[in-house]
Image (cartoon, rainbow, N blue to C red):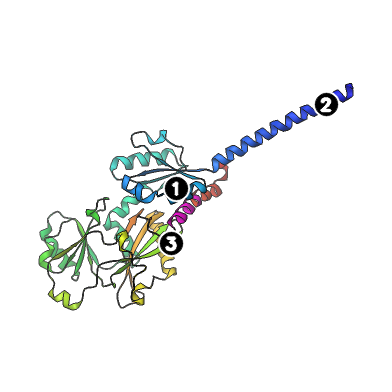
C-alpha cells in the first residue's frame, strides 16, 4: 500500500506539473493571440470617418482581427494605444508636430503616412515636379504671387496655350482647394484667384482615370471629367468657367456607354511602374493619381493630380483591399524584425 501511495503521490506531482505546463502554454497562446490582434488608431475628420469607416469595413476588419480605435485629440497621443498603426488625415501644424514627435518616440508604430510626405503632395508645385520628372505632366506654370494682374505676362512668357485649367496651389482639405477654373482668353486671366497652378487643357474624351494606390494594390475607376473643347468653342468662348470638384464620387463613368477608345483603361504595366516610382519618390503608401489620355491617342497619358488618402468607399471591394493592406504592413514588419515580436 505504501508503494502504491508513493506511486500515487508521484503521479499527482506529475499531473500538477503537466497542468501547470498547460496553464503556461495557454497563457503563452493567449498572449500570442492578443499580439496577433491589429490595433489601428485613427485620427480623421467626422466627415472622413463617416465615409471611410462604414459598417462593412468594420465588420470585415473584426473578422480579420483588426480593430479601429479613435484617437482622442484632447489627450497626449503617447498616452493612448498601444497602436500597431496610426491612420490619419487631419490638417494643421500642431497636429503634424504631435505626429512627428510620436513617430520619433514610437518607431515600432506604422504611421500612415509621414506628415512631411503628405505635405509634399498638398503643394501642387512639388507634386507636379515629381510628375514632370517622369515625363507624365502636361505643360504648366506656377503663379505664387498675390496680385493677379501679372498672370497674363507669366502665361505669355511660359508659352502656355489657351484654354488653361487653374487650380489652387495648395490643397488644404477645403472644398475650395479642389475647385478649378477653365480660362479661355488672356483678358480673363487677371480675374483668377492666386496663388495657383495653370495647366494647359487637354481634350481627353471627358473621362479621367482615378488610380488608387493602397500599398501594393492598384485599383482603377473611370470618372467623368471636363468635356472636350472643340475648335469652334475655343474661337467663340471667352471668360472663365468655374467648376466645383470635378471627379466626385457621384460622377462614376464605369457603367456609362462610352467610346471604347475613351473607356480603355491605361495599360497595367504602365500603372504598376508609375505606382512603384511614385511610392518611392513620395514616400506614401495611400494615395490616388488622376490620369487622362489625350483624345485621339492611345498611349499619351498625363498625370494631372495626386491626392493623399482619397475617398475609397466607392471603390469596388475597397474593404478587402484595405484590410489586406493593413495586415500586410504588420506581416512585413514581423518578417523584417522577428526578434522584436518574440
- The number of numbered badges drawn on the structure is 3
89 up-or-down from 194: above or below: above
Mark number, residue 58: 1
In the image, which residues are magenta? 317-327
The x and y percentages for residue 209 are 35, 66
Q: Residue at x 27, y 54 (%)?
A: 123
Q: Is residue 157 above or below residue 342?
A: below
Residue indicated by mark 2: 8
Mark 1 or mark 2, earlier in chain:
2
Q: Secondary structure beneath disc 2? A: helix
Instruction: State which mark lies toward you, 3 or 1.
Output: 1
Cα–Cα span, label 3 and label 1: 22 Å
Q: Residue furthest top?
A: 2
Mark 1 in CB contact with mark 2 (< 8 angstroms): no
Residue depicted at x 25% and y 59%? 245
Quarter in which the C terminus is drawn: top right
Q: Is residue 114 above or below residue 301?
A: above
In front: 128, or 301? 301
Q: Is residue 289 left or right of residue 246?
A: right
Element type where label 3 sits in the image: strand
CB within 8 Å, label 3 to label 1? no
Instruction: Identify the mark nearer the N-term, 3 or 2.
Output: 2
Distance between mark 1 and mark 2 Cα atoms:
54 Å
Q: Where is mark 3, residue-wise?
A: 218
Residue 334 x, y percent position in the rendering = 54, 47
Dominant secondary-structure state across the stretch colored magenta: helix
Q: Is residue 268 above or below residue 212?
A: below
Amino acid at each position: 500500500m505504501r508503494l502504491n501511495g508513493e506511486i500515487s503521490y508521484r503521479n499527482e506531482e506529475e499531473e500538477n506539473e503537466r497542468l501547470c505546463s498547460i496553464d503556461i502554454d495557454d497563457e503563452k497562446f493567449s498572449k500570442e493571440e492578443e499580439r496577433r490582434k491589429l490595433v489601428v488608431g485613427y485620427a480623421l475628420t467626422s466627415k472622413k470617418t463617416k465615409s471611410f469607416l462604414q459598417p462593412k469595413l468594420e465588420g470585415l476588419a473584426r473578422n480579420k482581427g483588426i480593430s479601429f480605435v479613435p484617437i482622442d485629440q484632447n489627450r497626449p497621443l503617447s498616452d493612448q494605444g498601444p497602436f500597431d498603426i496610426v491612420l490619419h488625415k487631419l490638417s494643421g501644424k500642431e497636429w503634424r508636430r504631435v505626429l512627428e514627435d510620436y513617430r520619433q518616440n514610437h518607431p515600432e508604430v506604422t504611421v500612415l503616412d509621414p506628415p512631411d510626405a503628405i505635405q509634399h503632395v498638398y503643394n501642387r508645385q512639388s507634386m507636379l515636379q515629381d510628375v514632370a520628372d517622369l515625363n507624365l505632366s502636361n505643360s504648366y506654370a506656377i503663379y505664387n504671387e498675390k496680385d493677379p494682374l501679372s498672370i497674363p505676362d507669366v502665361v505669355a512668357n511660359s508659352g502656355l496655350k489657351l484654354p488653361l485649367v487653374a487650380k489652387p496651389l495648395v490643397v488644404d482639405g477645403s472644398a475650395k482647394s479642389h475647385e478649378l477654373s477653365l480660362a479661355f482668353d488672356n483678358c480673363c486671366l487677371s480675374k483668377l484667384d492666386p496663388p495657383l497652378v495653370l495647366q494647359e487643357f487637354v481634350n481627353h474624351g471627358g473621362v479621367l482615370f482615378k488610380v488608387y494606390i493602397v500599398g501594393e494594390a492598384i485599383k482603377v475607376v473611370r470618372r467623368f471629367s471636363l468635356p472636350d473643347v472643340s475648335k469652334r468653342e475655343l474661337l467663340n468662348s471667352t471668360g472663365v468657367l468655374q467648376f466645383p470638384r470635378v471627379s466626385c464620387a457621384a460622377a462614376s463613368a464605369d457603367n456609362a456607354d462610352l467610346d471604347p477608345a475613351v473607356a480603355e483603361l491605361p495599360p497595367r504595366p504602365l500603372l504598376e511602374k508609375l505606382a512603384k516610382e511614385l511610392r518611392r519618390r513620395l514616400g506614401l503608401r495611400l494615395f490616388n493619381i488622376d490620369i487622362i489620355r489625350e483624345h485621339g491617342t492611345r498611349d499619351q497619358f498625363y498625370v494631372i493630380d495626386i491626392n493623399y488618402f482619397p475617398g475609397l468607399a466607392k471603390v469596388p471591394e475597397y474593404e478587402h483591399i484595405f484590410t489586406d493592406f493593413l495586415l500586410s504592413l504588420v506581416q512585413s514588419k514581423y518578417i523584417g524584425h522577428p526578434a522584436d515580436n518574440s
